[in-house]
Image (cartoon, rainbow, N blue to C red):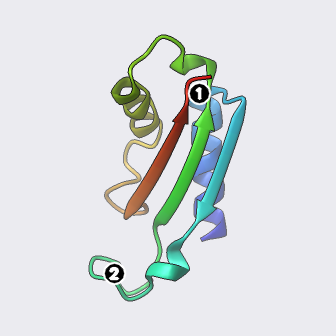
Amino acid sequence: MRELAQQIRARLEQALQPTRLELRDDSAAHAGHAGQRGHGGGHFCLSIASPRFEGKSLAACHRLVYDALDGMFSEDIHALSIDIDRG
């Protein structure tokens, strides 16, 4: 999961140039839950601040995060909790 967290972090940094990015892998707490494809991974908690969020609605900020991680939700990320700081 460490490699996956690094991939998530790299995509977010490239797309959003965050001033703060905290990513926690909570996958171990969800091992064995339905939809985990037997590995218990893919649960993350994200707290992020970015100048790209300025003047945007919370929904638009979430969309920027989802767009940055496009393609990862179908295979790698099962759940993502997002805390947006629009500063």
Q: Name the residue that disc number 1 marks.
A: 16
Q: How many marks?
A: 2
Relative depth, front residue between 50 and 17: 50
Q: Amino acid at mark 1?
A: Leu
Judged from this view, the residue extending furthest toward the top is 55
Picture quadrant of residue 67? top left
Horizontal side, residue 60 vs residue 14: left or right = left
- Residue 34 is tagged as none
Disc nearest the viewer among 2 and 1: 1
Judged from this view, the residue extending furthest toward the left is 34
Q: Name the residue that disc number 2 marks.
A: 37
**Judging from the image, what secondary structure is the residue with disc 2 in?**
loop
Q: Amino acid at mark 2?
A: Arg
Q: Residues within 10 Å of mark 1 (few under 14, many from 20)?
A: some
Residue 30, percent across and down?
44, 80
**Judging from the image, what secondary structure is the residue with disc 1 in?**
helix
Q: Which quarter of the rendered picture does the N terminus lie within?
A: bottom right
Judged from this view, the residue extending furthest toward the front is 87
